Image (tube, rainbow, N blue to C red):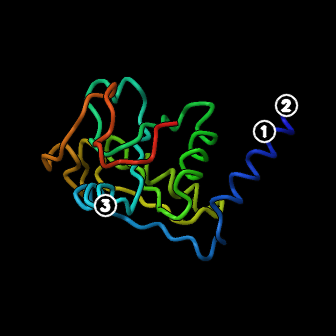
Amino acid sequence: MQKIFKLFQVLAVMLFAGTAANAEITKMAPDVARELALAGEIVLIDIRRLEEWTDTGVPDVALLLDMTSKNFLAKLTAIRIQSPDIPLAFTCRTGNRSNYLTGELEKLGFSGIIDVVGGMSGSRTDKGWARRGLPIRPANSQPHPKITVTQP
């Protein structure tokens, strides 16, 4: 079983990878991320946990993928397979986890990754999704109809 998991990890890295030298982490404001997600130019992924999604709601254009789940990499790969040429943007509560995750993905050689600054609640660097008054949907509802990538 461990060999299969390792093989899966290698395949996932190959699917995302450029070279570490070519990988760049773009920082993006929440309002820009929403515009680009609606235009189909990025896939926005909220990486918080279920209880956080339930407490605050989620960005109306975001897919939900708990970065602490055991199947995180498999679901992230499923999203990438649906949209191999579209950058993946990550958001969380304040931007700390998305910043961390994009850094780790960069170390693995992933390309086409974006850190949405300020997250849902805001931070010192950005007031975030909710304080900008951007649309929020309940965690148990579907993303905005213009979002064509499906939730894995």
Kindly indicate whether the residue at mark 1 contacts the one at mark 3 (C-beta within 8 angstroms). no
Q: Which corner quadrant of the image does residue 29 belong to?
A: bottom left
User: Which residue was labeled with disc 3?
Assistant: 39
Say which residue appears at 35% left-offset and 48% top-offset.
Answer: 147
Query: Which of marks 1 and 3 precedes in the sequence?
Result: 1
Residue 102, disc: none
Query: Which of marks 3 and 2 precedes in the sequence?
Result: 2
Labels 3, 1: front one: 3
Mark 2–mark 3 distance (CA, rounded to whole Å): 40 Å
**Amino acid type, callout 1:** Phe
Percent position (x, y) of residue 69? 56, 31
Mark 1–mark 2 distance (CA, rounded to whole Å): 6 Å
Kindly indicate whether the residue at mark 2 contacts the one at mark 1 (C-beta within 8 angstroms). yes
Q: Is residue 51 above or below residue 123?
A: above
In the image, 39: left or right of 50?
left
Label 3 crowd bin: few (<14), some (14–19), many (20+), radius 10 Å: few
User: Which residue was labeled with disc 1?
Assistant: 5
Label 2 crowd bin: few (<14), some (14–19), many (20+), radius 10 Å: few
**Amino acid type, callout 2:** Met
Q: Is residue 51 above or below residue 36?
A: above
Mark 3–mark 1 distance (CA, rounded to whole Å): 35 Å
Percent position (x, y) of residue 42? 40, 59
Say which residue appears at 59% left-offset and 44% top-offset.
Answer: 78
In the image, 7: left or right of 54?
right
**Amino acid type, callout 3:** Ala
Labels 2, 3: front one: 3
Percent position (x, y) of residue 138? 26, 28
Q: Which corner quadrant of the image does residue 89 belong to?
A: bottom left
User: Which residue was labeled with disc 2?
Assistant: 1
Q: Is residue 46 above or below residue 132?
A: above
